[in-house]
Image (cartoon, rainbow, N blue to C red):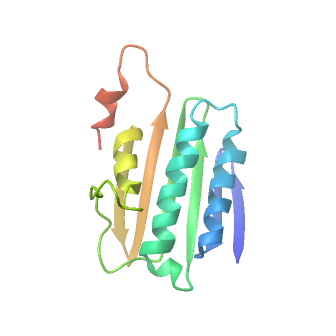
Amino acid sequence: MDSSEYEGNEWVLRLAGSPDQVVRARRLVSMTLGRDHPLHDDCVLLTSEIATNAVVHSRSGDGGVFTVTVAYSSEAVRVCVQDAGSSNAPCVCHAPADATGGRGLPLLEALAHRWGLVREAGANKVWFELVLELAGVPKNRLAGVR
């Protein structure tokens, strides 16, 4: 089950909550931005992480759906993944070095200029924004803004 919708510079894609749909979420971001967009690789990586979290850690992966929204310009990208909710809020936990998972939200923390989590009406909405470097403002100054 999937449906997509386009408005201006924003794409919305609704996907079944199965692991094979994470690649479709990545593909949406890749095709929307184009491989030449300077933020392409980081956006695809972070989308993969938060879409995987939606499938693995929420009711989306239990027969539900999740939605990916991509809004972009030549200077900035915002990606949002909304899932079917979970009993616990996602956390920025630091995984042990030998763990095979647990690095999604720490990657958001490290790479995104801004990111956030909204828990509303039983659903989780995780979003991130990446912007091209602003003249005179180093990335690490922006990364702490929430």
Res 14 seen here: no
Q: Residue at x 48, y 69 (%)?
A: 54
Residue most extreme to the front: 98
Tell me where residue 138 appears, x and y as whole percent: 35, 21
What is the total number of numbered labels drawn onto the structure image?
0
Is 121 or 82 nearer to us in this picture? Answer: 82
Rendering coords of residue 108 (x, y %): 39, 48
Picture quadrant of residue 22: bottom right
Q: Residue at x 56, y 34 (%)?
A: 39
Query: Residue 82's x, y, as percent?
Result: 49, 66
Identify the residue shown where x is 34% and y is 69%: 119
Q: Is residue 115 above or below residue 52?
A: above
**Residue 140: % across, % down:** 31, 29
Image height check: is 94 above or below 122?
Answer: above
Q: Quick one: 75 or 30, which is closer to the camera? A: 30
Closer to us: 51 or 117: 51
Farthest residue in the bottom direction? 63
Which quarter of the figure has residue 48? bottom right
In the orientation shown, which residue stands out farthest toward the top?
A: 136
Please state, as top left, top right, bottom left or bottom right, where the N terminus lies in the image. bottom right
Specify the quadrant that holds the C terminus: top left
- Report whether 103 appears left or right of 83: left
Q: Is residue 30 above or below residue 135?
A: below
User: Can the viewer see residue 131 in this picture?
Assistant: yes
